Amino acid sequence: MVGDGIKDNGEQRNKTASDIYQVQPYYQRFDQKNNMTRQRFWNPPAIELTRQLHENLKENILKNRPGYGLRDWAFYAGATANMTNSGFSINWPNRRGNSWQPLSKLTQSLAMVSPHPGYGKLEVDPSIATSLVKKMGHLFGADEVGTCILDRRWVYSHWFDEETREHYPIKFSDEPGYEKYQEPAQLDDRTQVIPEKMKYAIVLIHEMDERGMATAPTLTQQATTLTVYSRISFITVMLAEFIRSLGYNAIPSANDTALSIPLAIDAGLGELGRNAKLITPAYGPRCRISKVITDLPLEPAEPGLWGVTEFCNGCRKCARNCPAGAIPFGERSFEPLGIFNNRGVLQWQIDHMKCFKYFAKVGTNCGICIRTCPFNKSKHWGHKPVRNIIRMKNRNVDRLIARMDDLLGYGRYQTPDHFWSA
Ligand code: SF4
Ligand code: SF4
């Protein structure tokens, strides 16, 4: 059952993302500064591309191009409203809306019973705690919830500060000099410290609207994505505060602090695709990921493989459709194409600079490799048999399935009018 760890044929049980993607001894934790979304603050070519992106967005709006009209603009404004209101940042850790500190003392309801009545700390078996956080994750609005042990290799070596445009270390409290920090902290020199006892992560999957993503690349599609980030901004904060109120620490996070995809794989929620997206059984790559890091002891899921790598080997539909030529047709590799890739992980290496150039050209982010992926399907019953065939790992039919997907018209661009008419 999805969300409780993908059940596979047993042969891959207990493997983690680092086993599956053969992380090499020379691998080093990724510096968030090198992510393309952060390079736009400090790297001259990326700064110039960001300027072009804004220019082209403006032109698309002024010329009232499909997907850049008043409704699309209003959708975009509405989609970002909650993040603006709460100060939640997609990429900036430990700041206002996604603070690493308890928020309850600031809220009126709990101020009424101040001082805290003193319930103490929840002491239960990890399996019960896991059920509890999954229940609350779903109730607060996540579509899938999984749990894993926090593999530190996926935590950024440094976080990027949009204010100073510099990067600062992320340390653990068992590193020399940081032993006294038993609660998450930002130090005066802007180092973030994660207590060593925060060994667990809850990973949450958030579906993006199928019709909205079918308009990729437009402002309609970008607003579809941002709607989900706005949801993440309250779901993760609520879940983190729930955990803190049980007597534990919690760090809510969207794209900041750690790489979300390998954590999601460790939490049994999907596999890595050729398009460098998490491919989930329920939505394929049509989702966003968030996480909450905690010291509440949890039972980790069992990552499982259901044939995504093998299917991607034969499919290549995202590579064929990428207008930037950023997705490779060939084999996976340990070697990066630039500072925007990790070195020492066996994966299809995406040229994120080429991808970002295409963003600049269209004036929004893109999403074509999400729209066109054969795994991007609704939960409609008719798609179930195909998913089951892929899970059976009969590699002879992979290309046929990908071809049929094309012939049946799946993944084609749909006009924003189609989105608005539904
Ligand atoms: S987002 Fe667009 S440009 Fe970037 S890799 Fe995907 S299809 Fe290519
Ligand atoms: S489009 Fe095909 S090759 Fe690309 S991620 Fe999806 S299944 Fe894999």
Image (spheres, helix red, strand yellow):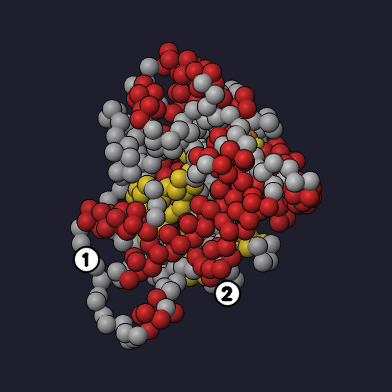
Q: What residue type is labelled 1?
A: Glu
Query: Depth-wise, is mark 1 or mark 2 nearer the camera?
Result: 1
Q: In the image as oriented, which residue stretches furthest toward the top?
A: 396
Q: Which amino acid does label 2 sit on?
A: Asp
Q: Give the vertical position of 50 relative to 279 (above or below).
A: below
Q: Please provide percent x and percent y for residue 122.
A: 24, 67
Element at label 2: loop
Instruction: Identify the residue at image location x=57%, y=56%.
Output: 79
Q: Please provide percent x and percent y for residue 275.
A: 55, 33
Closest to the observer: 318 or 258?
Answer: 318
Q: Please provide percent x and percent y for residue 315.
A: 52, 22
Instruction: Identify the residue at image location x=55%, y=48%.
Output: 225
Viewed as shown, does residue 272 lie left or right of 368? left
> Which residue matches tag 2?
188
Instruction: Identify the residue at image location x=48%, y=57%.
Output: 231
Q: Give the vertical position of 260 relative to 86 (above or below).
A: above
Closest to the observer: 227 or 303?
Answer: 227
> Which residue matches tag 1?
123
